[in-house]
Amino acid sequence: MKLGRLNHVGVATPSINASIAHYRLTMGAEVVGEPFDLPAQGVRVCFVDTPNCQIELIEPLGDASPIRAFLEKNPLGGQHHVCFEVPDIREAKAWFEGRGCRVLGEPRIGAHGTPIFFLHPKDMGGVLTEIMESPSGP
């Protein structure tokens, strides 16, 4: 297994619209995608492009959203996870499990339309880590 590039940093927010305004006005972001819902994961997401990766803004979608608990502890929002690309999601899952890392659920389709899974923060130096199969194409 070979770890690939940093794809994005996930940032939980109580309001994607307010966060978009912040990234545009305060940070000078020029390329911001349209927010969209991921009902299977209980979130609404939006990507802000930077020169070397993306910021994934994540807002709860309903009361059962896993982001809701994060925002209860961090009402202003904040860094939620980092996401690294790998060439093969199944190989990566087996590799991490072989090292005793806890994989949180089975691979599923993420916001980029490719398979993802998360690794428990206690096995990743305190950082919730998303592993994502590298997207093909542009």
Image (tube, helix red, strand yellow):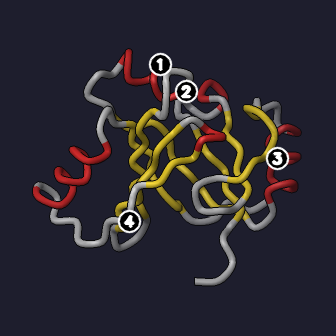
Name the residue that disc number 2 marks: 66
Q: Earlier in the sequence, mark 2 or mark 4?
A: 4
Query: Does the residue at mark 2 contact the one at mark 1 (Cβ under 8 Å)?
Result: yes
Q: Are marks 2 and 4 in contact (CB under 8 Å)?
A: no
Q: Name the residue tied to disc 3.
A: 93
For discs 3 and 1, the disc positioned in front in the rendered view? 1
Q: Position of residue 80 (x, y in %)?
A: 45, 36
Res 122 quadrant in image: top right
The amino acid type found where label 3 is placed reads: Lys
Q: Does 11 appear above or below 109?
A: above
Quadrant where the C terminus is found in the figure: bottom right
Residue 136, above or below 24: below
Q: Secondary structure at mark 4?
A: loop
Locate the N terminus by quadrant.
Answer: bottom right
Residue at figure coordinates x 34%, y 36% from the top left: 13
Q: Amino acid at mark 1?
A: Ala
